Amino acid sequence: MKKALFAILLFFAVFSCRQPAEEKPWPDDRLQGWLAYYGITLDDFTASDRYDRHYRVEQEFELTEDDLHAGLYIYSQDSTLAIDLDSYHLVLEEKEDGQLYSPGREVDMEVGLIDLVRGIRKRLLFCGTPCMFEEATFHPDGPVVVAGFVENENGFHPAIWSIDPGEESVKLRRASLLVIPGEIKYTSEIRLSHISFWFDEKEHIVTDVPL
C-alpha cells in the first residue's frame, strides 16, 4: 500500500515539474470566425517558428474624421490601441450614398499597431505576395495575433502570427491545409463585406491577388 501511494505521489511530482505546453492564440470571436470559415482549428497548426521583426517603422498618427479606414481598425478592449490591417494596401473611396468602394489594392501588405493615446503608429508585420493578412485580435496577455496565409512551393497555407509589441521577434504557426487563391475570400466576404470591390462589378475577372 505504501509503495502504491509513493508511486502516485511520485507521478504527480514529476507531472507538476513538466514544462507547460506552448500557449496558443486566444480563440476569441474574430479568430474563431476566421478558423470556422476555412474549416480548421488551432490544433491544425504546427509548433511555431520564431524570427526577428523586419522593416521596423514608427510614425506619428492622428485619428481624423475623414479617415476612411478608421471604421476598419480593430480596437483593444479599452480602445487605447488599434490594429490596422488595411490602410497600407487597400485603396478606399466613398460614394455619394456613403458606400465605401475599393478600386484595388497594392501587392504588399502591412500590419500596423496604433497607440491612440500616444499618437503613434508602429509597423508589426510587412510582407509582399508570399503572405496575406486577413484577421487580427488582441491576446489577453498583450500580443497581437494575426491570421492569414503564407505561400511556399506547394501553395497557400493558413498561418497565425503572434507579435508582442515590446519584443523584436514574431512567432509564426502554419497549418498543412492547402487553399487555392480563389478560395481565400474571408476578407471580402466577411470582414470587409460592407465594402464593394472593383472585381465585384466586372464579369469574368480573375485576380492573382485575392481580397
Image (spheres, rainbow, N blue to C red):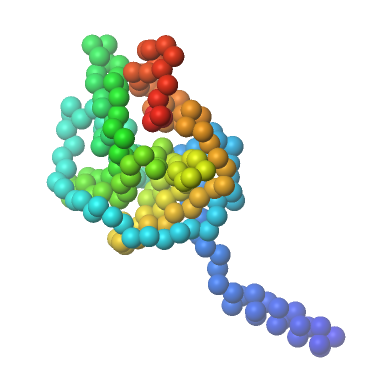
Q: Identify the residue shown where x is 40% and y is 25%.
A: 207
Q: Residue 150, image x and y in percent?
A: 44, 44
Q: Residue furthest bottom?
A: 2
Q: Nearer the viewer, residue 96 or 159?
A: 159
Q: Quadrant of the N terminus?
A: bottom right
Instruction: Please count the marks in the image.
Output: 0
Q: Residue 112, image x and y in percent?
A: 28, 45
Q: Residue 158, image x and y in percent?
A: 50, 43
Q: Identify the residue shown where x is 25% and y is 37%.
A: 88
Q: Is residue 117 above or below residue 89?
A: below
Q: Nearer the viewer, residue 8 or 208?
A: 208
Q: Residue furthest front?
A: 153
Q: Quadrant of the C terminus?
A: top left
Q: Nearer the viewer, residue 161 or 126?
A: 126
Q: Identify the residue shown where x is 16% and y is 48%.
A: 59
Q: Identify the residue shown where x is 21% and y is 46%.
A: 121
Query: Does residue 167 appear left or right of residue 185 in this picture?
Result: left
Query: Does residue 59 appear left or right of residue 17 in this picture?
Result: left
Q: Residue 167, image x and y in percent?
A: 31, 62
Q: Is residue 177 above or below residue 202?
A: below
Q: Is residue 53 above or below residue 109?
A: below
Query: Does residue 42 appear left or right of residue 71 in this picture?
Result: right
The reply to whether residue 73 is in sight is no
- Quadrant of the rendered image containing residue 166: bottom left
Query: Does residue 29 appear left or right of residue 122 in this picture?
Result: right
The reply to whether residue 131 is in sight is yes
- Quadrant of the rendered image containing residue 79: top left
